[in-house]
Image (cartoon, grey):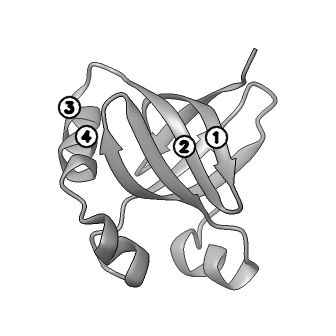
Amino acid sequence: MKDSYKVYWNNVLIGEVVITGVDMWYLDCTWNGYDNDDCKTFEKQAATQILKEVIQNPDLSKVLKVVLVNANNGKIYCLVMKLEKPDLFMRQVVAEETLQKFFPDR
């Protein structure tokens, strides 16, 4: 059985993912959004991301940042690449300098 992660966006719980594939820093996930306004806003923005732009320039102010938290409180920090329901594609942020840049309050 694959681990499920709670997804937090702007410190708000908006859904859950199951990681279905990993390629270096990239995660393929199955998305299950919750029925709340924050989730709907997130889904709209994530679905309209231009994947090529996010890959070429992750410094864009519109980049969606999420934190995945598993049952053991383990955290994975990610930049959202694209949402194509039910698939959510993300890039893990692992380098300390990049973590500080995108997640300074972690």
Q: Position of residue 87 (x, y in %)?
A: 40, 35
Q: Give the image quarter of residue 68.
A: top right
Residue type of the residue flagged with mark 1: Gly
For the residues labelled 3 and 4, say whether their Cβ atoms are less than 8 Å apart: no
Q: Which residue is situated farthest in the right direction here?
A: 72
Q: Which one is earlier in the sequence, the residue at label 1 or at label 3? A: 1
Q: Which residue is mark 3?
A: 37
Which of discs 1 and 4 lies nearer the camera? The answer is 1
| Res 58 visible | no
Left or right position of 78 against 82: right
Q: Give the image quarter of residue 84.
A: top left
Residue closer to the observer: 36 or 20: 20
Q: Is 34 above or below relative to 51?
A: above
Task: Tell me the element at label 3.
Answer: helix
Q: Which residue is mark 2?
A: 28
Q: Residue at x 39, y 83 (%)?
A: 56
Q: Which residue is mark 4?
A: 43
Q: Which one is earlier in the sequence, the residue at label 1 or at label 4? A: 1
| Res 25 visible | yes
Which of discs 2 and 3 lies nearer the camera? The answer is 2
**What is the distance, in whole Å, between disc 2 and disc 1 at their CAs?**
5 Å
Q: Which one is earlier in the sequence, the residue at label 3 or at label 4? A: 3
Q: Residues within 10 Å of mark 2 (few under 14, many from 20)?
A: some
Which of discs 3 and 4 lies nearer the camera? The answer is 4
Task: Tell me the element at label 4.
Answer: helix
**What is the distance, in whole Å, between disc 2 and disc 3 at their CAs?**
24 Å
